[in-house]
Image: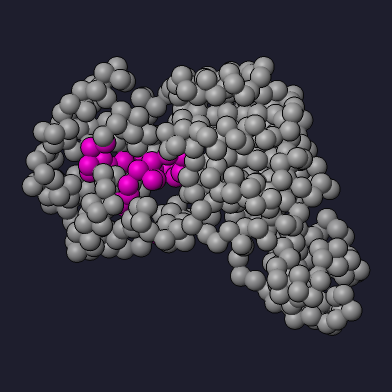
Amino acid sequence: MIKFEQYKLSNEVLEALRLFGYKTPTPIQNAVIPILLEGKNVVGKAQTGSGKTAAFAIPICERIIWDENAPQALILEPTRELTVQVQQEVFLLGRRKRLKVADVFGGFPIDKQIQTLRQKTHIVVGTPGRVMDHIRRESLHLNKVKYLVIDEADLMLDMGFVEEVKEILSRIPKGCQISLFSATLQPKIQELVDDYVRETTVVEMKEEKASQIDEIGYYVTQDEKFEVFIKVLIEENPKSCIIFCGTREMVNVLFQKMKRKKIFCGMIHGEMEQRERLKTMAAFKRGVFRYLVATDVAARGIDLEEMSHVINYDFPTGRETYVHRIGRTGRNGKSGKAISFICDTDIHMLEMIESYRGEKVPIKEIPNPDEGKEKEFWSSVGKKDKIKEEKGAKLNQGILRLTIGGGRKSKMRAGDIVGAICSIEGIEVTDIGIIDVRESKTNVEILNDKGKHVFATLQTKPIKGKIRKIKMLAR
């Protein structure tokens, strides 16, 4: 059996992988990691859920030089949700090496992002538009970037980011290692590769989704759709389910209908505040509620493990959209169900999807659940399920975050914090994690279960010639 140790990774990265729960590399990881560690460019074709984030993140975290203050790696993501997700995974994989990973995307104040980028930053994850904004403002410099990743390239180009991506590619230093990952290698992606990426190694992973996803179609009218939907929920009683609607308005309508039925659920669409979207996604991942009503903003790349069902409440209007939606379930070798409601106006698109994929969507009769299933369903849908442990929670064990009174206004520097903490008996520089200097405060992580000792000592120990207010931060 293949192990991560065979790649001769550092102890810090191996320890992070162990605590993350990664035991053996997936096929895409086994194919890509050795190539990237050799410094070669990669173009990878792999479906969502194959483990490709770790495939590029592990070599990057392994090769980053901690002492360098400027960003050494830039990872481009098409959506805000993907940016946050990937930033978290890269951060956790680089946790033991104390790597600083910043995320930049629209919907959040750019000034706060500028403050973050002014500090020591090893890796930047961002959407192309916001990345270019920072480049033009000169708050992000690419002169030290050695590794560039273009993730979900097909979606990136479909969303209209092609010019920003080309601009970024034209600005990176010569010799920068480039990795591009996409679910498809359509002509416009191949053209981008031919123009900007030299001497590539192409890695194509075989699709294995069909055998893992049980697809079902139900013919319905618009008037009966919600009634059939409830019957399907009762019949299936999903453990975790995304319900896709075609518009933001329909998401709101279905969400309210489900609430009136006392079915505990969440929703996500593009008109929601960014913080609310991220909060909802985090709650869904942790199992706070089983059902998420969504537009296609949630259809690509979001890491939702053990998704039992996907329901196309509104049938998709594109062939690729169907594939991306049902790809939310049946991930990493696990089985799942993809259920679609098909109205008369959807028949042509159904035929196009079947022709595109070379297989039929099985059509079944609308279920009529028995009393036992109804009782079981209605007794469970209004309750909160047991909340799951956050992914990578073990990597945060033994870490305490402190906030120290004093920041840039009082000319506080990271070196002042390091000097004061390292002068405490029993504390070494390897016990200090991320230091984040803000305008009037500084946040610092203390590692290796030494946080309470540092917290107690700093109550009476001056930093930059002054006793500071020290508080513990909740995670």
Instruction: Tell me how many marks there are.
Output: 0
Q: In which quarter of the image is the C terminus?
A: bottom right
Q: Where's residue 113, x and y in %?
A: 62, 58
> Can the viewer see residue 377?
no
Q: Could you tell whether 421 is left or right of 251 in the image?
A: right
Q: Could you tell whether 184 is left or right of 353 in the image?
A: right
Q: In this view, does 240 lie above or below 365?
A: below
Q: In the image, what residue occupies the spot 76% across and 74% down?
A: 409
Q: Which residues are the magenta region?
A: 288-316
Q: Could you tell whether 31 is left or right of 364 in the image?
A: right
- 44 or 339, which is in the foreground? 44
* Coloration mode: one colour
Q: Could you tell whether 281 is left or right of 213 in the image?
A: right
Q: In the image, what residue occupies the spot 46% across and 19% down?
A: 187
User: Is residue 419 one of those drawn in magenta?
Assistant: no
> Can the viewer see residue 180?
yes
Q: In the image, what residue occupies the spot 63% across and 18% down?
A: 201
Q: Where's residue 257, x and y in %?
A: 19, 59
Q: Where's residue 339, x and y in %?
A: 25, 37
Q: Where's residue 330, x and y in %?
A: 39, 34
Q: In which quarter of the image is the N terminus?
A: top right
Residue extending farthest front:
136
Q: In the image, what residue occupies the spot 65% across and 52% down?
A: 137
Q: Is residue 288 above or below residue 455?
A: above
Residue 450 lies in quadrant:
bottom right
Give the dominant element type of the magenta stretch: helix, strand or loop: loop
User: Is residue 300 one of those drawn in magenta?
Assistant: yes
Q: In this view, does 299 lie above or below 226?
A: above
